[in-house]
Amino acid sequence: MSVCAESAVTLSQRIFCELREAIVEGAIPPGSKISEAELAARFGISRGPLREAIGQLAAMGLIERRPNVGARVVELSRARLIDIFHVREALEGTAARQAAVRMDQQAVAHLRETLDAHEQQIREDAGHAYFQAPGDVDFHYRIIQGSGNAYLIKLLCNDLYYQVRMYRCQYGMRSQRGPAALNEHRGIVDAIERGDGEMAELLMRAHIRASRENVERMLGQGRCAVADRRDSE
């Protein structure tokens, strides 16, 4: 569960959650300078809790701090997006393998319910879009949580997860892959239900690799509005 969904959160945690969503959804656009004075005035708080929240955002890769420049919202480039896919392929493959061992039948049933909802969504959008909502309704999120591996959960659900959502929210990434991706998801669930960790990992890796190759084709055709520059770091 996200800290933002808990009943009692500190002031800095609340500000962190609000800023995170504003960045992910584009209300604070990529490349924007983070002004502590402006944000403190906006939220009506002191700079102490705000600095703590900004530090958390920097740790998860949504904000960059650079010498003589200050803190800015990250500008996700094509190169960084592809790097994220490579990391996801390796780590989510491992998560799927462990989920096949650790997820119970009720958790698998919830996965199937999620996919049924996604199938309806695809039908309503002429089979083109496969935009998944955040949190537990996200198929990948559920499997990562189901792995029971705290390290994978931290890396994939607390860090890379929101960078991926940033792309989904702001750059669309719409394609014809919706029905194929759904079928791939169903195959992964079948392997998890059988307890076949090796096959679950192979299918998850193949699924994410196919998504990356599709995104690379879209980028090459200029169909995604992702920054064209490479990171200067």
Image (tube, rainbow, N blue to C red):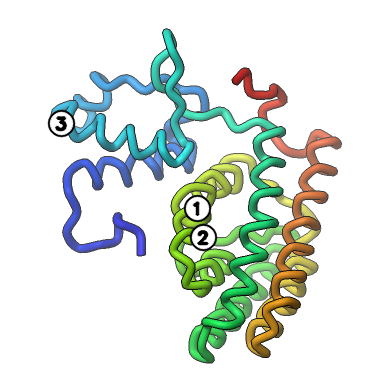
Label 3: state its secondary structure. Answer: loop
Amino acid type, mark 3: Gly
Q: Which residue is mark 3?
A: 44
Image position of 2 (left or right of 180)? left
Mark 1 neighbour class, 10 Å CA radius: few under 14, some 14 to 19, many 20 or more: some
In the image, residue 194 above or below residue 218: below
Q: Image quarter for residue 75?
A: top right
Between the C-alphas of marks 1 and 3, the distance is 32 Å
Q: Which residue is mark 1?
A: 155
Q: Residue 11, percent across and down?
A: 17, 44
Mark 2 neighbour class, 10 Å CA radius: few under 14, some 14 to 19, many 20 or more: some
Between the C-alphas of marks 3 and 2, the distance is 36 Å
Amino acid type, mark 1: Leu
Q: Residue 142, percent across and down?
A: 52, 70
Please give the name of the residue rendered at 56% of the width and 85% of the height, measured from the top-left corner.
108
Please give the name of the residue rendered at 32% of the width and 20% of the height, measured from the top-left corner.
35
Select label 1 or label 3 by which is in front: 1
Q: Which residue is mark 2?
A: 152
Image position of 68 (left or right of 43)? right
Q: How many numbered marks, from 0 up?
A: 3
